[in-house]
Amino acid sequence: MTSGVLDPGLSDKLRQLGAFDAERCMSCGICTAICPMGISTLPRRVMRLAALGLEDEVRAQREAIFSCLLCRACEVSCPAGVHIADNVRLLRSWLLRGEL
Ligand code: SF4
Ligand code: SF4
């Protein structure tokens, strides 16, 4: 069970920063299995949390979001064509803006 801030408009906010498309994620888990960082929360969990607007939960994944290598190894196998690395970049921008 999750708690904290739920912002249904989070995806729209992220789209104002760029081409955010995490809503396409089917949560299949292929990307997480492939990620060379072995980051258990990336990218599947973060994509779903962001798409669902679970703002506090996304913020709690800050370390994982900034640990991503942006290598795109996950993207090439994503059956939904999610632009995972670009989404991670947008999440970083959004997190940093919240700290300004
Ligand atoms: S591979 Fe694509 S569809 Fe599957 S969990 Fe990862 S981002 Fe979502
Ligand atoms: S782009 Fe990031 S999340 Fe995707 S495989 Fe590379 S390190 Fe992992």
Image (cartoon, grey):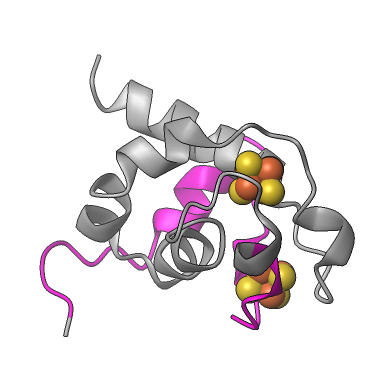
Visible residue check, residue 24: no
Image coordinates for residue 7, horizontal then vertical, percent: 29, 62
Q: Is residue 48 left or right of residue 49?
A: right
Closer-to-camera residue (82/16):
82
Q: Residue 17 is drawn in which quadrant?
A: top right
Name the quadrant of the N terminus.
Answer: bottom left
Residue at 62% across / 77% down in the picture?
Answer: 29
Name the quadrant of the C terminus.
Answer: top left
Extreme residue in the left direction: 4
Image coordinates for residue 38, horizontal then vertical, percent: 53, 52
Q: Is residue 7 magenta?
A: yes
Image coordinates for residue 45, horizontal then vertical, percent: 45, 67
Q: In this view, does 86 lie to the left or right of 2?
A: right
Residue 100, compared with residue 97, is above or below; it is: above
Residue at 68% across / 34% down in the picture?
Answer: 70
Residue 6, compared with residue 96, is above or below; it is: below
Q: Residue 95 is drawn in which quadrant?
A: top left
Type of secondary structure dominating the magenta stretch: loop
Point out the quarter of the image occupied by ligand 1. Answer: bottom right
Closer-to-camera residue (20/16):
20
* Range of residues picked out in magenta: 2-31
Image coordinates for residue 20, horizontal then vertical, percent: 64, 50
Residue at 33% across / 37% down in the picture?
Answer: 63
Extreme residue in the top direction: 100
Residue at 61% across / 70% down in the picture?
Answer: 23
Residue 14, compared with residue 9, is above or below; it is: above
Visible residue check, residue 68: yes
